[in-house]
């Protein structure tokens, strides 16, 4: 190596070290550092949050759905994220992570029946008449729907209705079962709708939640304006938290989501009309060339629970009693839509 090359090498090394030192000083300066450089990331992705909370991905998704874990919408859009403060709050609870895992623990038919000390046949009958309501579902290897129930709700039901776990089945329940009644899918839809409504304050997002329970033909009959229908579809909640899911899972969701009982269809129509009236009063749906920003759904701030505007049956189990729509609303709705269509046959695999 010549003296010139050695001098150039020392000069280059000095210049590189000086650049690195200047970059570190620039990053540490609070006047020039951005939000990400000022400290640890304020939010993390859902997968990272699930790892830090010691949850499987399915357990994490269910915890978000139940409102046990708060999420934040990124400013630029995209999948919801979990705040670092929310993770720290959950990790600081006594006995972490066992209490959180216990709240999202689910059981299928066989495990639930064993937990209650009854036969799977009797448990299936209790679920079909609506005594217990599924909170989620999975697909087995035959792509049949397997309903999942919260263990916490099962133990509460056993303590509340011990007489239904043994002895003769009540005549009313036997009549429903003999007629082929099955409220599992309907109660799952009611449970899901109630949870989604509690997580948003945006009137159009709430109307989109209601609209997701109607098939495209029913939706077109209720909402005449094509721009409003397109806006409702765009504001519709995703089927899973931040994940597209498998093809078979999406197909099962598409089959289970629409209401399939005439009474349920009519009730969904009434609630959608009520939500649409409220949304139209707040702001009109965006149209091409109107120059208005296409606002996204407004999430509920942490600690604030938004009561649903229209009175409905949604909630845990879906056994609430509606007070009915405003006078004349049902007649106006029926005049626009006509009577509900006949119930669609259940696809194979729903009886598990």
Image (tube, grey):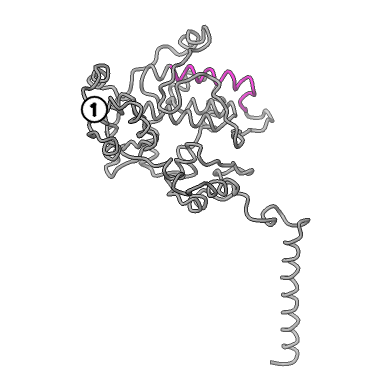
Which quadrant is the C terminus positioned in? Answer: top left
In this image, 38 relative to 228: left or right? right
Which residue is located at x 39 percent, y 44 percent? Answer: 246
Q: Say if 344 sits above or below 7 in the image.
A: above
| Among the 4 quarters of the image, the one containing residue 157 | top left
Which quadrant is the N terminus positioned in? Answer: bottom right
- How many marks the image carries: the answer is 1
Q: Say if 294 sits above or below 3 in the image.
A: above
Magenta region: 267-286
The residue pinned by badge 1 equals: 166
Which residue is located at x 66 percent, y 54 percent? Answer: 36
In this image, 85 relative to 29: left or right? left
Question: Quick check: can you spot residue 224?
Answer: no
Q: Residue furthest bottom?
A: 2
Residue 146, image x and y in percent? 31, 38
Question: Quick check: can you spot residue 194?
Answer: yes
Most frequent secondary structure within the magenta stretch: helix
Q: Name the residue nearer the viewer: 336 or 118.
A: 118
Q: Name the residue nearer the viewer: 298 or 321.
A: 321
Which residue is located at x 28 percent, y 22 percent? Answer: 181
| Among the 4 quarters of the image, the one containing residue 75 | top right
Residue 55, image x and y in percent? 45, 49
Residue 279, image x and y in percent? 60, 22
Q: Does the magenta run of residues contain 271? A: yes
Q: Residue furthest right?
A: 31
Q: Secondary structure at mark 1?
A: loop
Q: Does the magenta run of residues contain 153? A: no
In this image, 322 relative to 342: left or right? right
Density class for disc 1 (Cα within 10 Å; few <14, some 14-19, many ≥20) is: few
């Amino acid at each position: 190596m010549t003296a010139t090359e050695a001098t150039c090498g020392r000069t280059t090394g000095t210049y590189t070290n000086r650049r690195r030192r200047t970059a570190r000083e620039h990053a540490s300066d609070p006047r020039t550092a951005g939000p990400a450089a000022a400290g640890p990331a304020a939010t993390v992705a859902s997968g990272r949050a699930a790892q830090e909370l010691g949850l499987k991905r399915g357990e994490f998704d269910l915890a978000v759905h139940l409102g046990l874990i708060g999420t934040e919408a990124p400013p630029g859009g995209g999948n919801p994220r979990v705040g670092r403060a929310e993770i720290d709050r959950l990790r600081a609870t006594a006995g972490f992570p066992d209490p959180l895992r216990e709240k999202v623990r689910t059981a299928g038919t066989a495990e639930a029946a064993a937990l209650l000390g009854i036969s799977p046949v009797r448990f299936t009958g209790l679920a079909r008449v609506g005594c217990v309501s599924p909170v989620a579902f999975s697909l087995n290897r035959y792509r049949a729907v397997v309903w999942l129930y919260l263990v916490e709700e099962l133990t509460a039901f056993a303590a509340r209705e011990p007489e239904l776990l043994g002895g003769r089945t009540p005549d009313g329940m036997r009549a429903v079962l003999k007629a082929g009644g099955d409220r599992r899918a309907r109660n799952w839809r009611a449970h899901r709708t109630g949870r989604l409504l509690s997580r948003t304050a945006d009137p159009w997002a709430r109307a989109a939640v209601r609209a997701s329970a109607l098939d495209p033909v029913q939706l077109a009959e209720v909402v005449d304006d094509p721009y409003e229908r397109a806006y409702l579809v765009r504001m519709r909640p995703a089927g899973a938290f931040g994940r597209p899911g498998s093809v078979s899972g999406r197909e099962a969701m598409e089959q289970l989501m629409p209401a399939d009982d005439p009474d349920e269809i009519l009730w969904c129509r009434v609630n959608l009309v009520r939500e649409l009236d409220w949304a139209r009063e707040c702001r009109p749906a965006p149209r091409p060339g109107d120059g208005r920003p296409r606002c996204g759904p407004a999430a509920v701030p942490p600690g604030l629970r938004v009561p649903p505007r229209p009175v409905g049956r949604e909630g845990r189990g879906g056994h609430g009693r509606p007070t009915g729509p405003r006078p004349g609303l049902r007649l106006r709705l029926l005049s626009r839509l006509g009577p509900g269509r006949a119930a669609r046959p259940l696809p194979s695999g729903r009886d598990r």
